[in-house]
RNA sequence: GGGCGAUUAGCUCAGCGGGAGAGCGCCCGCUUCACACGCGGGAGGUCGCUGGUUCGAUCCCAGCAUCGCCCACCA
């Protein structure tokens, strides 16, 4: 190694992430690139990044997802796959509206005042200024995304793809317009989907109201929490099996206040044991009642408008706010002696996930998508195992939703988004077209007005895996990189996004967009609450990267990635940061202390060599297999144990006696193995800890490509020696015990067969004597000349021997225990038998 | 109401049918020639509770308790 490089290694006694990360990332981008090669014949490996909202800042979820995906990308790149990690952001209609409308409010204006065109222009301006900061933040984590082809769901080409999708589905009859009850969010001024409604407890009152039965002097009493909607009642329903009311079915009731005569119907939806067992049916203002209404062909009356006030349909109440109307209705019912009772009532009420406003179910004309056939095709893929959820049990979430799928309301009353490609002429004809038409398709009128609504953001997200590759235009990137391999996301958007991508991928590409769906853990705040900005429980990943380095952060997040909910623990990142430093220093030691002439090679000269080579082969085998099965926590744990305990604590320490000894040949041999093991280890750790490993790689001897694009190590399975590893564990205990005794001021003596593992460590230890004895069955440590401790040792060994023997004598044990367990017990019995006789010999010698 | 998951050392978590583990924290000793972001040694646990299966249960089964997340149209 050149003198300057040596000096640098000697000087840098600590790994300093902040000093190397930016430089290495820049080299990766410049010298290697992350764009994938559409021309290559190599097998592809493709992941589409779940596009973060343009409004977003990197949060813990992104950092975890990013760490996992980048680890997978790097592993497969090192395997020689043609890798592509699709990169981009989502236009996030509602979130962007929130940002811009807040700005407008601060300026004393509103979106209505500035108008649609100016509003949208303003959004673009904001987008140009702030850019997608979150994508830049992912670079800090080391993510090797295809930044050169970054996409945005509002890009020209992407918008075309969305329009194309709409038109095709419309032509197929799957998209249609209908009056339906929808979740109206007064805050958003738009509908929101069922998945964007949160249910929260609310304290309301339950009113019992008497409805006169037509042609009698009797009453039917119903229970309601929304008396103001009485004005829109179009039936009263009871359960068909309810003997109390069976005789009333087919008769009519008079709706209080408005005096409308409505049928009394029977419907199984009604719960006999709730309230009075009679339900007022208001199709215009309740989703369930809407369904009942459709089943029975009832009129749909709206008395509440989109402005949150009573509409003209409500007659004398028109113009009142809903709350005021409610009070007035109650007063009227009371004065007319129709209010039978009132009691406090706590129940769940829908709130908008974004704004927190209480959802108002309203009937309106919206665009819908029929999901049944699409869902059936997607479900078949999941049922057959062709699409696999990991962990498997997350499928339940998917199926629960998909097996009960309902039409999807895809129109939103917003301005920022993909405007629905439907134009209306004054005669009301529809023209549906990807490009703006010049004339009505039916009557030729040139006076066309475009549907003002935009599409649900998830509509465009659903085609992310292929619209990002240039669909619908045929092209090489699309042909090469679709379908992808795995989707990595959190379980809260399994239905919102994953299911819809599956359906659209199958519909438009004829093939599932990915085979594996890896559902990550969700990291909670340290106190067990949800991590969220609003709760103030969030942790900024960029701060973590500063504190622990990108490698430490990635390591820590992967380590936390075990169960479905896990509490954030800084300790795990700290562990990662320390491991990076440990690895750096192990590299310094190996590169500075070994014979520079030694050619890196796995030379199995001593027992320690064979042992570390066995451990290395086993570790490579396991760590890679665990990454392949998405068991990141286990993988990272295996890396840690090998690097810190096996390599640094035991092998490097044991190697020192040869390294610093007089035997030149031994020095060269152990040097060769040390460098070889280091090289393999660093390559193995690269997917998880890319920066420190790349930095070390640069100091390894010889001309070499960057580690990013170097091959992943192959486990040398012929190096594996489980018996040796087992006896190593025993010898480790002997070494520890000798150290303890020496620490207590004893003068321990170790009797060991020649070539026993780690005796080199004892020979270097102060106050420990080592005695080579070919007859020794196992390494045994005794306190020199101390009859008492020898006897104690003998007693313990006899007890262990007896224990193993009695187990073997137990018929039930022999009959049921697996063969390898029985063998292990047998070996144990033999080993302790050997130890017993060793100690006995030493006792006699005293 | 339904689904999923958790309950193991002071803290965060592994282990999931055959002798209770890691990291951090704590105690003792080390300026040992890679690393004090270190080295060596150590203390600390009736593995939530109750039953069951088994020769044997932290691990499997049932029930209970507590906590978390997701889903859900009881007016």
Image: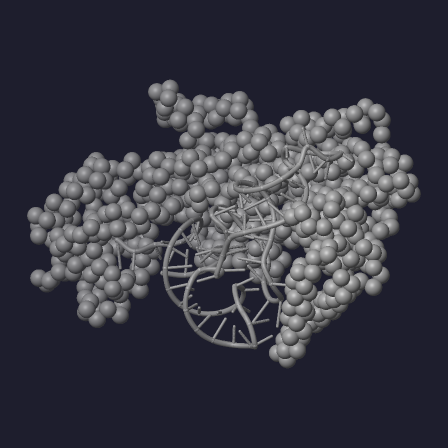
Residue A468 quadrant? top right
Q: Which of A164 and A529 is in front in this view?
A: A529
Q: Position of residue B48 (x, y in %)?
A: 44, 60
Q: Which residue is drawn at 76% across and 62% down?
A: A846
Q: Which residue is drawn at 47% across and 36% down?
A: A538
Q: Residue at x 73, y 55 (%)?
A: A784
Q: Position of residue A69 (x, y in %)?
A: 63, 43
Q: Is residue A811 placed above or below A773 in the rendered structure?
A: below
Q: Residue at x 80, y 62 (%)?
A: A776
Q: Nearer the viewer, residue A123 or A437?
A: A123
- Left or right, B31 with respect to A234, comes to right
Q: Position of residue A102 (x, y in %)?
A: 39, 26
**Coloring scheme used:** one colour
Q: Which residue lies furthest to the top in this view?
A: A107
Q: Is residue A677 visible?
A: no
Q: Which of A713 and A518 is in front in this view?
A: A713
Q: Which residue lies furthest to the bottom in this view?
A: A811
Residue A22 quadrant? top right
Q: Nearer the viewer, residue A721 or A636?
A: A721
Screen quadrant of the N terminus of chain A: top right
Residue A36 quadrant? top right
Count of numbered labels shown in the rendering = 0
Q: Is residue A122 placed above or below A173 in the rendered structure?
A: above
Q: Position of residue A278 (x, y in %)?
A: 22, 61
Q: Is residue A308 visible?
A: yes
């Amino acid at each position: 190694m050149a003198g300057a490089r040596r000096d640098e290694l000697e000087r840098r006694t600590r790994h300093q992430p902040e000093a190397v990360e930016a430089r290495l990332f820049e080299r990766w981008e410049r010298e290697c690139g992350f764009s994938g090669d559409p021309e290559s014949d190599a097998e592809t490996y493709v992941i589409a990044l779940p596009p973060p909202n343009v409004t977003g800042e990197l949060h813990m979820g992104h950092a975890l997802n990013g760490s996992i995906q980048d680890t997978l990308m790097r592993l497969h790149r090192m395997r020689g796959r043609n890798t592509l990690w699709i990169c981009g952001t989502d236009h996030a209609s509602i979130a962007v509206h929130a940002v811009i409308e807040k700005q407008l409010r601060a300026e004393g204006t509103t979106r209505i005042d500035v108008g649609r065109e100016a509003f949208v222009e303003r959004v673009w301006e904001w987008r140009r200024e702030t850019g997608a900061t979150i994508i830049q933040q992912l670079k800090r984590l080391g993510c090797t995304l295809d930044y050169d082809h970054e996409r945005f769901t509002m890009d020209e080409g992407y918008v075309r793809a969305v329009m194309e999708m709409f038109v095709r589905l419309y032509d197929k009859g799957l998209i249609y317009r209908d009056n339906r009850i929808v979740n109206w969010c007064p805050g958003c001024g738009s509908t929101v989907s069922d998945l964007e409604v949160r249910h929260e407890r609310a304290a309301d009152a339950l009113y019992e109201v008497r409805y006169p039965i037509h042609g009698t002097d009797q009453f039917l009493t119903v229970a309601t929490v929304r008396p103001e909607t009485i004005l829109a009642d179009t039936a009263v329903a009871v359960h068909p099996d309810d003997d109390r009311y069976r005789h009333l079915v087919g008769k009519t009731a008079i709706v209080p206040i408005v005096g409308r005569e409505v049928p009394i119907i029977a419907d199984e939806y009604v719960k006999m044991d709730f309230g009075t067992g009679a339900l007022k049916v208001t199709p215009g203002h309740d989703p369930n009642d809407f369904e009942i209404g459709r089943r029975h062909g009832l009129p749909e009356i709206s008395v509440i408008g989109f402005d949150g006030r009573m509409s003209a349909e409500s007659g004398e109440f028109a113009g009142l706010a809903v709350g005021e109307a409610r009070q007035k209705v109650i007063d009227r019912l009371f004065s007319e002696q129709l209010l039978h009772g009132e009691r406090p009532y706590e129940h769940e009420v829908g709130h908008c996930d974004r704004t927190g406003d209480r959802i108002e179910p309203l009937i309106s004309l919206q665009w819908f998508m029929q999901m049944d056939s699409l869902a059936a095709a997607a479900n078949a893929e999941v049922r057959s195992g062709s699409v696999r959820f990991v962990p498997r049990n997350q499928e339940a979430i998917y199926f629960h939703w998909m097996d009960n799928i309902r039409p999807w309301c895809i129109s939103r009353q917003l301005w920022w988004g993909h405007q629905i490609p439907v134009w209306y002429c004054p005669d009301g004809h529809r023209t549906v077209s990807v490009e703006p038409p010049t004339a009505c398709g039916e009557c030729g009128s040139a006076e066309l007005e475009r549907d003002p609504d935009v599409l649900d953001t998830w509509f465009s997200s659903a085609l992310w895996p292929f619209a990002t590759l240039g669909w619908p235009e045929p092209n090489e990137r699309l042909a090469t990189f679709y379908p992808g391999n795995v989707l990595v996301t959190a379980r809260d958007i399994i239905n919102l996004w994953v299911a819809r991508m599956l359906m659209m991928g199958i519909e438009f590409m004829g093939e599932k967009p990915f085979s594996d769906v890896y559902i990550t853990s969700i990291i909670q705040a340290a106190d067990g609450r949800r991590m969220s900005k609003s709760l103030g429980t969030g942790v900024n990943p960029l701060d973590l990267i500063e504190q622990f380095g990108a490698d430490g952060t990635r390591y820590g997040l992967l380590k936390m990635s075990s169960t479905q909910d896990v509490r954030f623990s800084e300790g795990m990142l700290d562990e990662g940061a320390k491991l990076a430093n440990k690895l750096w220093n192990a590299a310094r030691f190996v590169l500075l202390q070994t014979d520079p002439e030694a050619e890196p090679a796995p030379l199995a000269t001593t027992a320690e060599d064979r042992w570390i080579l066995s451990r290395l082969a086993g570790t490579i085998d396991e760590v890679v297999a665990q990454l392949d099965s998405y068991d990141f926590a286990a993988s990272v744990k295996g890396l840690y144990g090998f690097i810190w305990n096996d390599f640094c604590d035991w092998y490097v320490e044991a190697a020192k006696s040869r390294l610093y000894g007089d035997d030149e040949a031994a020095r060269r041999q152990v040097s060769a193995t040390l460098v070889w093991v280091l090289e393999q280890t660093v390559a193995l750790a690269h997917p998880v800890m890319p920066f420190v490993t790349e930095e070390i790689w640069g100091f390894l001897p010889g001309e070499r490509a960057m580690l990013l694009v170097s091959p992943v190590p192959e486990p040398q399975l012929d190096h594996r020696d489980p018996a040796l590893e087992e006896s190593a564990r025993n010898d480790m205990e002997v070494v520890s015990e000798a150290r303890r005794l020496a620490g207590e001021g004893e003068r321990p003596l170790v009797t060991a067969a020649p070539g026993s593992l780690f005796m080199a460590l004892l020979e270097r230890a102060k106050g420990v004597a080592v005695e080579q004895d070919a007859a020794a069955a196992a390494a045994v440590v005794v306190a020199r000349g101390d009859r008492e401790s020898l006897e104690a040792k003998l007693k313990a060994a006899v007890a262990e021997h007896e224990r193993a023997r009695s187990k073997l004598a137990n018929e039930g044990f022999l009959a049921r225990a697996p063969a390898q367990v029985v063998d292990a017990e047998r070996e144990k019995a033999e080993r302790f038998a050997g130890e017993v006789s060793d100690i006995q010999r030493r006792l006699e010698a005293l």
